[in-house]
Image (tube, rainbow, N blue to C red):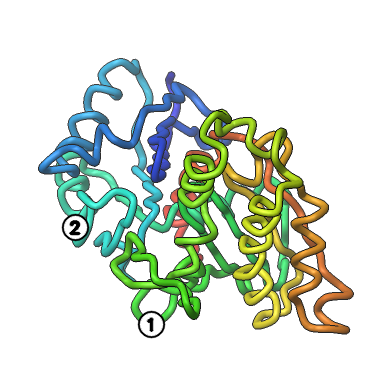
């Protein structure tokens, strides 16, 4: 390619995606790998640097403007250090930005992966002054992002919107974050795998909703998925709720029941009677696009 571009990277709990996005928003050289190639390394940042270098060698022309990476993690307020990554522990307490900037001599931006997923939805939908937008992305874990007045909510320490880690009474499972009783232990893709292994061991996970969506165990699981999002709706009274993630996008997922449970758990008469729920586009490139959109905004000096 012969254009200026940003390398966008989406590191999820299961998959690692990478691509080059130019200033026109076009994506090139998109690749998908297992996230385990990074998590098994004693030095995951070096592994990431080496991977990017090899990736770039196979691309002719163009000028790299920045690298932007989304992690399934809490990230420091200055957006340089990955604090805690329950599903990719090798990155815990790691300064990612400094060594990457030293190796590639361009700005490096990191953020929660779900912020980039919501960034993609905001750009794709051409949302202008959208008010309060909540993004809930249920995959391996329970991801959450909140966009208020054209800014992502990041909090005092940079670790706001950890919706999957709200504590639940009488739940004794140990979460990947180290705490006991986080709702992610009973409402996430990881929990769905446990349910499959325990109750439906002969069923391929991809068919679990097709074959068992009316089973009480599955209905209870889907109901549990709605508790966090209904809680957040009651707190923020959002203009728009965007739901996505691998679990929601599985074939046969009972969206009508899911929405009915959200309604059941939200405050009456409002916000329950005026919910605006939408679903994310099923595009495994979304995190790469979103990370690149974020980087281009930052390069322009926009504070988001």
Q: Which residue is pictured at 87% across the width and 73% down the height?
A: 274
In this figure, which residue is indicated by the disc labeled 2? 95
Residue 107 location, x and y as percent?
30, 50
Residue 112 left/right relative to 77: right
The quarter in which the N terminus is drawn is top left
Residue 159 left/right relative to 296: left
Instruction: Determine which quarter of the picture holds residue 98.
Output: bottom left
Residue 292 location, x and y as percent?
47, 43
Instruction: Determine which quarter of the picture holds residue 273.
Output: bottom right
In this figure, which residue is indicated by the disc labeled 1? 156
Q: Which residue is pictured at 52% across the width and 54% down the height?
A: 188
Q: Which residue is pictured at 38% across the width and 46% down the height?
A: 68
Whole-number angstrom distance, CA of label 2 to CA of label 1: 19 Å
For label 1, the SS is: loop
Query: Residue 201 shows which numbered tag?
Result: none
Q: Answer yes or no: is residue 86 visible.
A: yes
The crowding category of the residue bearing disc 1, from other C-alpha atoms within 10 Å (few below 14, some 14 to 19, many at least 20), is: few
Looking at the image, is 101 positioned above or below residue 30? below
Which of these two is toward me, 5 or 207? 207
Q: Answer yes or no: is residue 80 visible.
A: no
Residue 66 left/right relative to 118: left
Which of these two is toward me, 196 or 264? 196
Please say if the residues under marks 2 and 1 sit with CB atoms less than 8 Å apart. Answer: no
Residue 183 location, x and y as percent?
49, 68
Residue 303 location, x and y as percent?
48, 67
The crowding category of the residue bearing disc 2, from other C-alpha atoms within 10 Å (few below 14, some 14 to 19, many at least 20), is: some
Q: Residue furthest left?
A: 42
């Amino acid at each position: 390619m012969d254009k200026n571009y940003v390398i966008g990277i989406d590191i999820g709990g299961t998959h690692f995606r990478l691509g080059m996005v130019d200033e026109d928003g076009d994506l090139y050289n998109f690749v998908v790998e297992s996230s385990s190639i990074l998590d098994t390394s004693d030095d995951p940042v070096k592994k990431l640097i080496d991977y990017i270098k090899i990736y770039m060698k196979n691309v002719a022309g163009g000028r790299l403007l920045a690298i932007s990476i989304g992690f399934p993690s809490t990230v420091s307020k200055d957006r340089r250090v990955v604090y805690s990554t329950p599903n990719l522990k090798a990155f815990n307490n790691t300064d990612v930005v400094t060594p990457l900037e030293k190796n590639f001599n361009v700005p490096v931006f990191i953020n929660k992966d779900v912020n980039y997923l919501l960034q993609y939805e905001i750009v794709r939908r051409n949302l202008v002054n959208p008010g309060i937008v909540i993004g809930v992305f249920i995959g391996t874990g329970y991801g959450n992002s909140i966009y208020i007045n054209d800014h992502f909510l990041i909090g005092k320490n940079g670790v706001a919107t950890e919706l999957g880690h709200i504590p639940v009474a009488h739940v004794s499972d140990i979460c990947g974050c180290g705490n006991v009783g986080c709702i992610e232990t009973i409402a996430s893709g990881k929990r769905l795998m446990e349910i499959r292994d325990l109750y439906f061991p002969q069923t391929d996970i991809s068919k679990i909703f097709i074959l068992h969506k009316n089973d009480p165990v599955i209905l209870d699981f889907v109901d549990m998925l709605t508790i966090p999002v209904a809680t957040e709706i009651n707190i923020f009274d959002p203009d728009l709720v965007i739901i996505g993630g691998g679990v929601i996008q599985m074939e046969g997922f009972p969206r009508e029941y899911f929405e009915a449970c959200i309604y059941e758990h939200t405050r009456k008469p409002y916000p329950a009677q005026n919910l605006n729920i939408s679903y994310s586009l099923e595009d495994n490139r979304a995190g790469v696009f979103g990370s690149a959109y974020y980087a281009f905004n930052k390069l322009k000096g926009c504070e988001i």
